[in-house]
Amino acid sequence: MKEYKAGIYLRLSREHNEENNSIEAQREITNKYATKNGYKVIKEYVDNGYSGILDSRPALNEMMIDISRGTINMVIVKDISRLTRNKNKTGWYTEIFFPDNDIRFISVTENIDSGERYEIDDSIMLRGIANQYYVTDISKKVRANKNAMKEAGQFVENYAPYGYKKQENDKHKVIIDEDVADNIRKIYDMYIEGKTSSQIAEYFNINKIKTPSRYMNLKNASKKWRGEQICDILSNPFYIGNTIMNKYETNYIKKTCKENTNRDTWIIKENTHKPIIEKVKYDKVQEIKAGKRNKTRIKYQFLLKDLLYCGHCKRKLQYKIYKSYDKQRYLYDGAGFNCSLLYKTGCKNKTYIREKDLNEIIKNEIIKRLSLIEVDKTTNRLIDYYKENDENMQKLKEYQAEIEKQERKKSILYKKKCGQYITIEEYKREYQKLKEEIKKYENLIDELKEGNDNTLDEKKVKEIIQEFKEGKFMTNNFLKEIISKIEVYSKNKIQITFNL
């Protein structure tokens, strides 16, 4: 007779703490069965507080590893729902994984035993479907119950937002936490005074104010305030006494929670608790935030962008802004460059060179280089540069592109007429509109050409060239015309590869 090494698997969810399914009850049932039938229990696996719909659980994962190692060759559970409540996983365990690994599976209360042949009848799949339906039904009831409580103005989350705390005698009500409420007020006041969210975060870090997660003694609490945290606080209507419903979507089956980004589905319940921030001040902050979002952001492009390389490993240098701080504000010390691989793979080039210093070095080298170049040669390059970047030339290209677009529409319209997709009257009407549109852009082109002949005064051009030779008006695009790359070996060794 085959000797069996049994593993007993026990599981209980937090939500279903009923007595007949307790860990102790499961342990008694499974061990009694093993003893009665003479099976030796090698190991016990316990997942206390884990949903049966989850594929990954600590003890379950450990059991799967032991099965693959041959530590056990029998699995005993009180019922299949302890192993999983996922109907698809039920079939995978009983029809694929257990037979493939020579595992005898026993569900005590359901009288299921795969036996020596490792076979289970089709009824097990029906049990899997029933188990999953049970979990889905429970999750719907939990969600409905929580929504009803929110509608009644009750607080149902695990943690109150920073600045509040749950009442000791009623966990479904929140009160202001005066120990940290002034921090919320400080955040709003600083933002209205003109500070950015990053500056406010830095102020809190400098003054060693605990982050919300550290204040609440949460696991893996962040040590530093971040601008994103400040933004969240500045945008949260909870601080004016309102509760948002449907902001988060909780999956009670998988125990996951994600933010609902569709604000149209949010429901705001007003006056559910005492506010920390006055509504006038909150509205002022939202107005400032909206104004900042609407401003066109111009990203700073440093002069030597895409030209700088490490002389040792030949990778691009990285642009870094260094900051210094005091207790009231933070200041930019300036910017500079170092090797992008310095802290990754240990490039030996530890040189850090300030942007201002490097720009000056390159400027002087450019002046030397341009002094050796004939003016006429540079003039031709400059004229091409002006043609590519001149505003009128850009408009001319746009008008010509529009004419081509309308011509293509005429061709498509003609094919529709020939294919009898449109009537002759419709064709004539649309054709006339396209002709008028083409004529409009042709007139615009004529007007543009009359006011601009695209020629440059040669004398003026030479004056401009002279200014470039003296290091004035340098741009990144202009430098790329002259320089192929700049390799930095050290502060005293910089190699420039010129295009001309």
Image: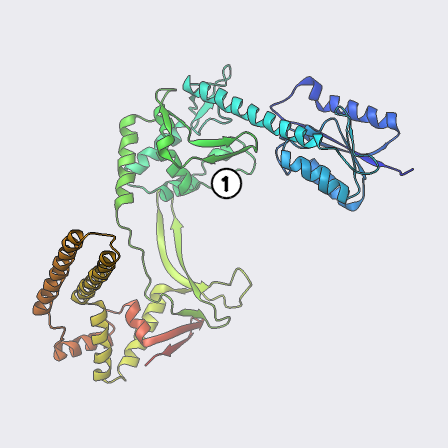
Q: Nearer the viewer, residue 219 or 358?
A: 219
In x, y percent, where is residue 357? 35, 67
Q: Residue at x 54, y 29 (%)?
A: 252
- Disc count in the image? 1
Q: Is residue 277 above or below residue 92?
A: above
Vertical relation: 425 (above or below) 32: below
**Left or right: residue 2 compared with residue 283:** right
The answer to whether residue 221 is above or below residue 413 is: above
Specify how the rendered protein is coloured.
rainbow
Q: Secondary structure at mark 1?
A: loop
> Is 76 situated above or below 24?
below
Residue 391 drawn at (x, y percent): 18, 64
Residue that sits furthest to the top in the current view: 169
Answer left or right for 221 relative to 413.
Answer: right
Q: Residue at x 70, y 36 (%)?
A: 59
Q: Residue at x 75, y 23 (%)?
A: 109
The reply to whether residue 422 is in sight is: yes
Q: Which residue does the numbered mark 1 point to in the structure image?
A: 223
Of 237 and 89, the residue lying toward us: 89
Foreground: 410 or 276? 410
Amino acid, disc 1: Lys
Query: Where, by quadrant of the figure, is residue 89 drawn?
Result: top right
Image coordinates of residue 253 in percent, x first then y, are 57, 31
Query: Can see residue 57?
Result: no
Q: If the image is split into quadrants, where does the N terminus sit?
A: top right
Image x and y of residue 42, in percent: 83, 35
Q: Which quadrant holds the C terminus?
A: bottom left
**Which of the two residues, 37 or 296, is positioned nearer the viewer here?**
37
Crowd tier of the residue under label 1, counting other residues whose Cα lies within 10 Å: few below 14, some 14–19, many 20 or above: some
